[in-house]
Every structure is written in structure tokens, then in C-alpha cells.
Image (cartoon, coloured by chain):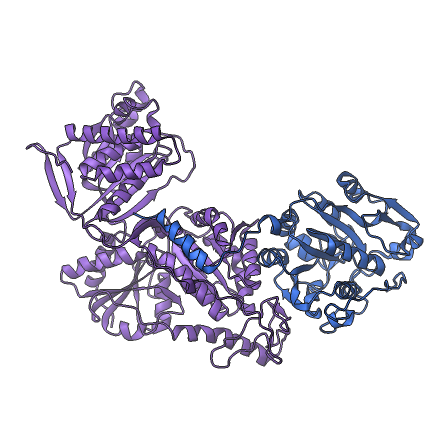
Amino acid sequence: MSSIPISLLDLEEHDACGLGAEDYQKKEGKWCAGCGDFGVLNAVKRLLAKHQIRPEKMAFISGIGCSSRFPHYVNAYGFHGIHGRALPIATGLKLARPDLDVFVVTGDGDCTSIGAGHWIHATRYNANMTVLLLDNNIYGLTKNQTSPTTPQGHPSNTSPRGSQLPALDPLQATLGVSNASFVAQTADWVPAHLYATIEAAYTHPGFSFVRVLQRCPKFTPDVFSANVKNPDLTELLVHEKGVNAPGLEKLFKATRVHDPKDLDGARTLAQRKDMLRLGVFFCDDSFPVYDEVRAVPPVTPEEKIQRLEKEFDRYAV
Amino acid sequence: LDRPTGNSVTINEVSEHTLEIITDSGEGAQKCAQIFGQTCAKMGNGVWTVEIIPAEIEPPHHTVTSTSGNIIRFGTHKITNWGDQSKLAIAFNDQVCLSRHRLGSFKDNCIILQESAWENHDDPNIRKMYAEAMQEMSSKNYRFIQVPIEEETLKIVDNPQLGKNMFALGLLAEIYQRDLAIIEKQIAHMFKKKPAKVTELNIELVKSGIAWARANLDFRFHVETIPPTDVRVVMNGNQAAALGAIAAGMEMCAMYPITPATSVSHELASIIENYGGIVHQAEDEIAAAGVALGASYGGKVALTVTSGPGMALKTEFLGLAIMTEIPLVVLDVQRGGPSTGLPTKVEQSDLLSAIYGQHGDAPRVVIAPRSIEECFHAMVTARRIAETFRCVVIVLTDANLATGVQQFTKPEFDVRWQQAPIDFSPVPEGLRPYDWDPQTGLSRRFVPGTPGGAHTVTGLAHDQFSNVSYHPESNELGCKMRSRKLAVFQSTLEPPEIHGDPEGDMLVVGWGSTQGAIEEAVDRARAGGLRVSTCQLTFMSPLEPGLKKIFSRFRKVMTVEINYSDTLGDPYITEETRRYGQLAWMLRAHTLVDVDCWTSCPGQPLRPNDIYNSIIAKSESGAPK
């Protein structure tokens, strides 16, 4: 597949744990050639190297689908769970272990269909984790079924005459949830933007939701071909508090200054279908973060016993 | 204590008594019963109380659907179940009384102290309802006594709704010769956060009830008390399970509201943060299991609490926990099913789904506490098994244990009941995430944070490196190792104790909450000369060892369960079509013994008398070889 040729950023590498980007690759990704998941894996490896995260200090949680194989390929703790349910596992893990960096990798079927309930509520919990929605507009692993984000009219094995309904827009949905604190969109064919967006998400304290627009080389190779071929059809959201990758503004003629704190503006932009927009739609780090608001001081086993003795006094006869 | 004097009063010496307080919801029956029960317990009686809960929160008053209240059974000795029918009742109106009558709750000759305001009420509709109710109840030989509960209460407080319960408590205090000093103390404790005036008024109401009873009632019941020598606590099974979770060191309870399990999380929510933990109310049952599993993956053995419909939803996550060998404790407070079924009522019908309700082979441990005290200890046991064997442990209680209140000896807590610190020591070179001991299937769990242990757990079939593997041998080995752990755990168990002789004509086998009622029924049958014994199982998966040998010493083996089974002789029901009670199915398959069953699913705990009758009937029907 074609892709806009932008070299990845030169990244400074710290020597805190001495691991380079390639050291974070546990094994070869087994996706189809040309799958956007490879690009996301590359960006994530570079992020981990840049921030020198020790493999044991992070966990990648996923559900089921092509993208959910992601944790198997990263040198980190991983949890490849069940379809649609990565977010509850990630929430439980973060509550139990706020010391860990938690990443969730999910697909459009996994997140916006079978896991849609969890998606809304995890957004509202706003636990500190980075959520990557690898959205290729189709079910790939089960071989070409319509997903909620499949474009209207696009044929698949379950809608041979084309998807009947307008696609669900994950940005609009996420921006509609109370306490949503970080919502961004990027694309697999713009690696520099992809990397910078994932990094912005990672550094945001709270639930950082990144929709990565992707093409499935088998079933949706052309869904974004117009944008891939003609960068003028894509508008870059720029702001000092947004995603900033050098060189991008040269490539994309259409740029828009958008303050990520402007929720109304973000919702309006997400709703407009005149152009594809990449960037941080919304970011506000002042919202309550679930793992912080639910944090309680640790209690030793001995103290617990002492308190339990008193607790039972309430029930003494 | 002041004893009533005079020839007009009969004092009946009884070893135990069952009574109920029945009111419209919101009239404070629970408070009255709670204080009465605590007073009995403090004086040294055995007590079991059961709540009568309407299905709706605020049903229309003075109707048969608004009945709220408590049944209290107390006696000289330990009380293990709600017993048979009630022998005395205080009813705040004729309709709630009628609802209990229709359920067959009152024994013939039951004494019913009834509010006198309705018989000659100004409203002709109320008079009519009253007359019709009394007519319907005249089929039984109840002794009705009219008591001006509201009138007497109004002499002390302006709003009788907030005082009748304490007047009723006074009636009971006099009828059963309860220690007023203890009652006063309990009232003071109950209202300690309210102004002192509230306590004073309540005590005044109790005294007025006592005075009315002294002046007007010609009977008393005397239940001998033996003052306790140990420190006791009194609570219901859900409170006991919640405190057990705390004692087990659990720091995460993820749940979604569901009757009758929710009050476990109420108890936990009010205290768990003092113990370094939280209750997470998830968006649904599935997420509750997922959050618990995620926390457990992170090293905190977590709990999720639910009931039947929630179990159904959590099923896929349980399979994931089993496949990834992440410890998880699930408390299933059983209610009537299928579907929404009987949300507030008891049934023991989740046994087979708890053990087998999964696609694929998914071995898990299932334990069923037999008493309220065991609800506490079961949580400690469950946490420990889950952690030791990297497995799912399901604790099956039920609505009977959840809402029944009983006293038991205060446990002596042990810090070792809590989770052992997580082993974060670096993983030695070469050790694999599923380095199963070929004998036991046990392996060290690499909790995130452990250096050198980074790996990806997966619900897919996997090899010992946790790599996805579709290799035939690898899958066979995984199945074998996950199953082996159950056999290893079973090897640590003792055969069940037999209540009665170790051999005889019939062995009654029960499980979980029915222990008290079954043993009482069996004792009655033995007293009548029958060679009947019973054993009550608590480990359901794996089953306790030695069952076949135990069964071989009895001519007939029969389970008693609160679930559905077909009755031979019903249309189409033959030996070929007959569906058995759930434990009976299991025991037949497990032992190849022709185990019979007597089951019932009335939405109520079993009554000893009904079990006794089934023993008699099954004894007469002859024993299979």
C-alpha cells in the first residue's frame, strides 16, 4: 500500500534501562503485509525506548481481533483477553497497580461493537491509561464482516450489497462521554503524526483515547485512498498543546489552530465530514482520574487484624 | 425479671419458639426483630432470624403484597435454620397477616396479636377487607388477640408509624420474659447517633408494650437460657462473607448490583477502604468480572459478587481466568431461576452451571458454605485456594444464608489468612510462565512488575512459554495440567462427616445452606427409630473424597436440595425421562450409586418437617439395591 513518505523522527534514547526500540520487539508481528498494525507497533516501540520503560513496569491489554495480537509482539507484560473486554481488565489492573504503565490495544469491532459498553464507561472512569483504537473499518480476523465504523455502502461478507447504515464515529461518541479527557485521531500513513499522537496520549494523565485510522490490506485497502493520495483532503489540527511533529505542516496545506481544551469546538469538528482531521481534538488534564480518586492508603496485615477486631464489636451480642 | 403473677396467667415452658412480626414495609419490623433477636442472643439463646421482604420498595400499604417483617426462631440450644411454622405473630394489619396465612406460615393454634384499629374502622372498605380476611383465615384454628397497637403508641408519639414497632417489642419482651436492661442497651446502641430523646421515647414505648401485655395477656412463654461462655457475634451470611473477604485480605471487590448479593458490597463499601481496598461498581456484570480479573492479574486476589443472572454474564471471563490461571474468587449468592426467576428468594440451582457452565474443559473449585459462620471462613479458604492453585474459586451461598441472621463464636483472626506478599523476585533464567510441575500442575505466577517475567497471558491455547499454540500435544498438556490441580486440591480434603451412624437404611446428602434443616429432620427421624444419617457437602468441585465408600454402607442414598427435579409418576416422567436434583445428577455420575433425590423449589428455605416427611415417604417406598 502507498504511504506518505515521512521518515520517523530522530529520537533521543536515554540509557535508563538501556533498551533500544528494537529491544521492545518480542517477536515478529504476524499481521498481513501492509497492515497498519506494524506502523503502530513501530511507533510504540520508539515511545517505549524514548521513555525507557522497563518491560516489567508496563502492561499491554487487548481483546480479540487482528490488532489484539499486539501484546504478543511487545517486550512487556501483556494480557490478550476476550473479545471487547480489554478495558475492564485494564481498569482493574490500573486500580490494583497504579505504578504500572497500562496500554490498551483494541480494534473497531472490539471497542465500538462488542465492547461498546465498556468503552463508554472506561472513558468516564478516566483511569490513567493509553488506549489505541486500531480502526481499519472492518472485521479482519474473522474475514471481512461489517463493523460499526465500516463506511456506508462498503460491501462485506455480511453486507454483500454494502453496509446499510452510516458509520459510527468513535470520536463523536468518545467526545460525548462525561469526563472524557483526551481524544485524538491519527493515521497509519502518517508515521510522524502517529508517533507524536501516541506520545501525547502516553504523557496525558488520564484515559487517553487515540483513534488510529488504518487500512486493512485484504478487506479495506482503499477506505482512505483519497486522503493518502491527496494530503490536501486532510486537515491538521495544530496547537501548542496539541500534537506537534516537525515537517508535517509542510505536507498538509490545510491546518487549523484548535485549542484542545475547547470541548464544543472539538465536538463540532468531529461532527463535520467535509475533511479528514488529524490531531488532538480534546485534552484536559484537570478531570478526576479514577485510579487517583479511588486510591486508598495501604494497610498492613497486622493493622487489618486490629481493625477487624473492632469491626466485629459492631456485631457482638 | 418480674414474673407475672396471679392465676390468670399460664406460663408455657418451651425449648424453642418461632414467631414473626409482620407489618407494612416501612413500619420498622426489622428494628424490632433485630433488637429482639440480639436480646435473645445476649441472654444465651440460640437464634435464627429471617427477613420477609416485599418485592417492591414502597408497595401500597395495607395489602397482601406489602408484607415486610421478620421470622425469629429462638431456643435454649443452637438454632440452625428457620424451623417449621410460626407459633406466634404480631400483625399490624389484616392484609399482611392474610399474606402469611396464604403462604402457610402459621401453625394451627398460632397466636396472632393483631392491630385492633381495623375491625371497626371508619372506612367501610377497610372493615370489609378486614372481615373477608378474617373469614379466609377462619379455616385455621388461630387464636386472634386484638391489640390497640396504634392507640397505645399515639399516647407516646405523634406518628405511630415510627413507634408501633417498639410497642410490639414490648409485647414480645413480656410474652417471652426478656431482660429489659438488655433491650434498653440495644435500643441505646441502635439510636446512638440520634438525639438522646429518641432512645428515651423508644424505651418508653417498649415499657408501654410490656405494661399492656401484663394487664391483658393470659399467657407467657418461657424459654430456658444458658448464658454464653464465649464471645459471640450475630450477623447475616452476606455480612459474614464481606467480613470474610476482609479477613482474607482482599482489596478489590468489583460488582454490579444484583439481588440478593448486593448487600455484600454494601457491607464492604462501608469498611473496605479502612483495609486498603475498594469496591468498584462496574458498568455491568461482565465488567465486574473483568475488573476483578485485572486486579488479580496485577497481584491482588480479587472478588466479584453476584447471583445467577450475573454468573451467566460472567461466564466468558471465568473461562479466561481459568485458561490464564489467574486466581479469582466469585461469590454467587444463589436465587431462584432460570432467567430473572425469584430474585429475593432462595434456590440451590446454580450448582451445575457453577461447575460445568463453560465451553471447553474449565475446571474450577466450587465451595458451598453450610452456615452463616462458614460464609465468613469460606472467603478466607477461597482466597487461599485461588492463590495456591492459580484457579477460579466459586463460593455458592444462597438467599437463605444471605438474609438469615445467626450468632456464632467470634473468630480468632490470623494474619496468615491474608494474601502472602507477591513474589517480585527476578524470574530465574529459563523459568517459563507456565512451568507446570508435571505432578501437580502448579507453577509460579509472574505478576507484572517482576523483572525477567514479561510475557503475554492469553485466552488462546498456549504452550508453557505462554505463546499461542495450536499444537495438539501442547493443548492436551494444558488441559491436563489445569485439571490436575483439582485432583491435587482434592487430595488435601477429608471425607465428609456423617451426622448419625456410619451405616443404616438411608443416607440423606445435602449441600450448602440446608444443613441445619436436614440435620434437624434426620434427628427427628432417628428419634422415631429410623436408621437414617446425613452428610452435608461443602466442597462441590472437586467433591470430597470417599463418597462411594460412605454410600455403600447405606441401603438408600437420597439428596435433599432446593431445586427442581421431576417426580416419578407424573405424566411422561419415567426412569428414562426423570431429571434429578443437581447434586443427585453429580453423585450418580461420580459414584455410580443409584442416588435418589427429594427436592423442592418453593422459593423458601426447606422446613425440617417437610424433609422429615420426605424421609418417611422415601423410606416407605423401599430402597433400591
Chain B on-screen colour:
purple
B9 w.r.t. B388: above or below: above
Tell me the residue at 91%/48% (across/down). A254
Image side of residue B527 versus residue B288, left or right: left
The N terminus of chain A - image quarter: bottom right
Left or right of A257, for residue A158: left
Residue B62 in view (yes/no): no
Front position in the image: B39 or B606 = B39
Asked whether residue B442 appears in the rendered view, the answer is: yes
Residue B500 image point, x, y percent: 21, 65
Q: Quadrant of residue A260?
A: top right
**Chain A palette colour:** blue
Q: Nearer the viewer, residue B157 or B353?
A: B157
x, y percent for residue B169: 26, 35
Q: How many marks?
A: 0
| x then y, percent, for residue A280 | 79, 49
Q: Quadrant of residue B127?
A: top left
Compared across the picture, whether B563 is left or right of B551 comes to right
Camera-side residue: A187 or A256?
A256
Q: Nearer the viewer, residue B161 or A149?
A: B161
